[in-house]
Image (cartoon, rainbow, N blue to C red):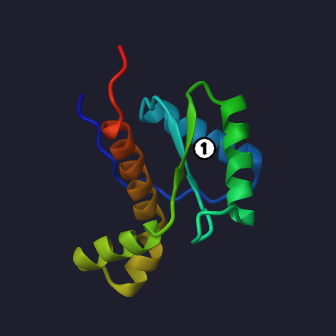
Amino acid sequence: MRVTARPVETIERRSWKALLAKVASLVRDFDAVAVVVGLPLASDGGESQMSIEARSMARKFTLSLSVPVFLQDERVTSYEAKRRLWEQGASLAETRERVDSEAAAVILEDFLSVLDSQPATE
């Protein structure tokens, strides 16, 4: 099975109801088998206010979606996303516009690499 990670549109968080509807729509459109939520830990690996919020959002998704929801450490993904965009020749304005969706792809790639490194269960 080939699994790929690629940037898609950035979702604005205006309300929980709108966010849930958009994520549920993406799950259907991409026939997704799971949702991965970035976990913004502090640089020392500890919890931050943003990581507490991400955990809360993941819990709500778990209760509302028909697919499993996972958390993935997202430290330094924005730096990696910017590096990739600069290598692609993106301007500063393009980088600002696309960095969040590119970082989301990095988070998914990191999650998939962790899965690949785990021994298979029978």
> For this view, does 30 lie left or right of residue 19?
left
> For this view, does 70 lie left or right of residue 57?
left
Q: Position of residue 90 (x, y in %)?
A: 30, 79
Residue lying at 39% horizontally and 58% vertically, measured from the top left: 106
Q: Amino acid at mark 1?
A: Lys
On screen, 104 above or below 86? Answer: above
Q: Secondary structure at mark 1?
A: helix
Q: Position of residue 117 (x, y in %)?
A: 32, 40
On screen, 57 above or below 32? Answer: below
- Residue under label 1, please give it: 22
Residue lying at 44% horizontally and 55% vertically, measured from the top left: 107
Residue lying at 58% horizontally and 42% vertically, measured from the top left: 23
On screen, 106 above or below 3? Answer: below
User: Between 15 and 68, which is closer to the camera in this rendering?
Assistant: 68
Rate crowding at label 1 as few (under 14), some (14 to 19) or many (20 or more) other CA atoms within 10 Å.
some
- Quadrant in which the C terminus is drawn: top left
Q: Quadrant of residue 91?
A: bottom left
Q: Position of residue 109 (x, y in %)?
A: 36, 50
Q: Position of residue 39 (x, y in %)?
A: 59, 55
Q: Residue furthest bottom?
A: 92
- Quadrant in which the N terminus is drawn: top left
Q: How many marks?
A: 1
> For this view, does 7 lie left or right of residue 2?
right
On screen, 41 above or below 68? Answer: below
Q: Quadrant of residue 77?
A: bottom left
Residue lying at 50% horizontally and 30% vertically, measured from the top left: 28
